[in-house]
Image (tube, coloured by chain):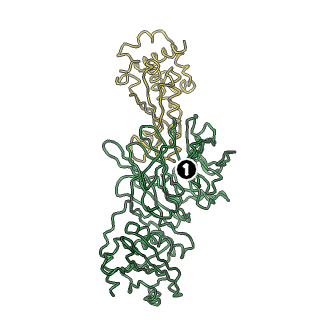
Amino acid sequence: MKATLFKLAGVLLTVLALGGCSTLGGGAADEQSADGAAVTDAGGGEASTSGLDAGGALTMQALENPDSPVYNKVIYFDYDISEIHPDYRDTVLAHGALLAANPRTTVTIEGHCDERGSREYNIGLGERRANAVKSLLLSQGAAESQIITISYGEERPAVLGSSESGWAQNRRAVFVYY
Amino acid sequence: MKKILFALLLFLLQVPAAPALTIEITQGAEGALPIAVVPFAWDGAGAPPPAEDIAAIVRDDLQRSGRFNPMPVADMLARPSDGAQVEFRDWKALGMESLAVGQVRPNGSGGYLVRFQLFDVFKGEQLAGYNLTTTERDLRFTAHTIADLIYEKLTGQRGAFATRIAYVTSSRAAGGDTLTLKVADADGHNPQVIVTSTEPLMSPAWSPDGRSLAYVSFEKRQAAIYVQEVFTGRREKLASYSGINGAPAWSPDGRKLALTLSKDGSPDIYVLNINRKTLTRLTTHYGIDTEPAWSPDGQEIVFTSDRGGRPQIYKVPSYGGKVSRVTFEGDYNARASYAPDGGQLTLVTRQGRDYRIGLLDLASGALQVLSDGSLDESPSFAPNGSMVIYATKINGRGELAAISVDGNVKQRLALQEGDVREPVWSPYTRNRRNQ
């Protein structure tokens, strides 16, 4: 039952994201809904009927579909923070739904940091970021065995340079599907 | 006269290999001691002289320390190679306080005997005299040893020229970065590749005997801790648990490695007995515990933890026990390591928006900020405790810098190309290679 609910939530999410509706991305509700409760509140019926036509958002092809919420495979973090920013919560939830719907799929979550501070501490911080993503994926019905986490700390920056914008692009978690 | 001619020949034959790192003094100590190190004479009749200019290496070492002001060879009016030839009045008139002279002789096949003497110019007295046997390939090491002996005689502190540094270089290429862990002499010469990878390499740590390096490699897309013998290249994988395998640190007796593992949840400090392969967990906190470092007596381990909300330095007995907090100043202190005498820690400390190298006096708790960069990290003491080497960013490029613990002497160590980071100064070793 619970799993079904989660799947429904995933479908819902997809629909909402495709339709440009932002009730889930709207900050306040998200922050207090780490268990995904807000998703089930969004009211069910119509979502489940109109959800899956456009290329099946819960199939693996969705990863390559620019209109799918799982097309986005990088989320960003605030400085020295490992909580998932409300702006990226939908992305993570969508990946969770994808994994739940495709139990043979595995994903590696890479955690990364900006260059500031000591390297091994940043390895710890990157792992915390990857784990924050992982627990949200699990909350969507993904299985532990589907998710590998690895922290690269500040060792693999996405962009070079010591600027605020560069740092912001480097503080990230990346979904890597094989 | 003949000797001078040979010395000159020696000078002209010099074709020094380009060092991996160029070292430049950016700030010297006031009152640097004037010293003349005369080119060593070649006393080998028809045999070819050695390829290295020993006196030049000694002068460079002393100069780089910031505590000496060696006389340029061109300013020397005489080139004695033995105490009997020295006219002390002349050197005194040139403002020299100390004078070193020497000779090199063949000693068996490929071997040399290096003789040197150090004099107090004012008193006209010999302070030290040594005969050193060496080989062609250990000539630089012998020269660094002579610089160490001079440094110790004149400053009262053991020199650290005949040591090495390990560091990680990164070069950007189309297919991604190439990381290389290297070891070079403390003056940047004789670079040697330890390991190369397209995946991250980090956290090199010298074994106390200077013969092995522990490091973290992400080859096969999984962090693992390796120990590799520097001379033979033989290596062993010591930790590859799920999650983090990081921050290896050798116990002073070389039998254990402290490390960071997250296999049981969050990153915690463990101690691995290298021979028995037994693992002891030292910390159990949901925060990040990492970057362990042993006290010189092996009794305590300091580490970085954010258990109080922000990264600070804590310590724990190395056999397990109660954790206590060490740093209280500021909101970011990390990556601590002990001075060789155990009285101070060097660490990374945030000052406003800048990450700098700090020196914490353990008795008083006073924190002194040593460096002035904005992204300084990875500090490591020289084995004599005189200087701290660290990584910095200059114009967006990773470079190494070293600073004396009194803040007076500053050096910049730059690679010709690419980034360099994570310097670790070796302990004292008895000999370069042949052991």
Judge whether residue B397 can be spotted in this image: no
Quadrant that contains the N terminus of chain A: top right
Measured along the vertical axis of the image, is residue B49 above or below residue B258?
below
Residue drawn where x is 48% and y is 56% of the image: B211
* Above or below: residue A35 compared with residue B137: above
Q: Which residue is mark 1?
A: B249
- The residue lying at 48 percent from left, 14 percent from top is A8
Side of A75 where B308 appears, left or right: right
Residue B383: % across, % down: 54, 62
Colour green belongs to chain: B
Q: Position of residue B399 (x, y in %)?
A: 42, 56
Seen in the picture, residue B266 relative to B95 is either above or below; the reply is above
Nearer to us in this view, B8 or B332: B8
Dot 1: element = strand
Q: Residue A91 lies in what quarter of the image?
A: top left
Which of the two residues, A35 or A99, is positioned nearer the viewer here? A99
Please give the chain letter of the residue carrying mark 1.
Answer: B
Q: Which chain shows up in yellow?
A: A
Q: Is residue B286 visible?
A: yes
The answer to which quarter of the image holds residue B411 is bottom left
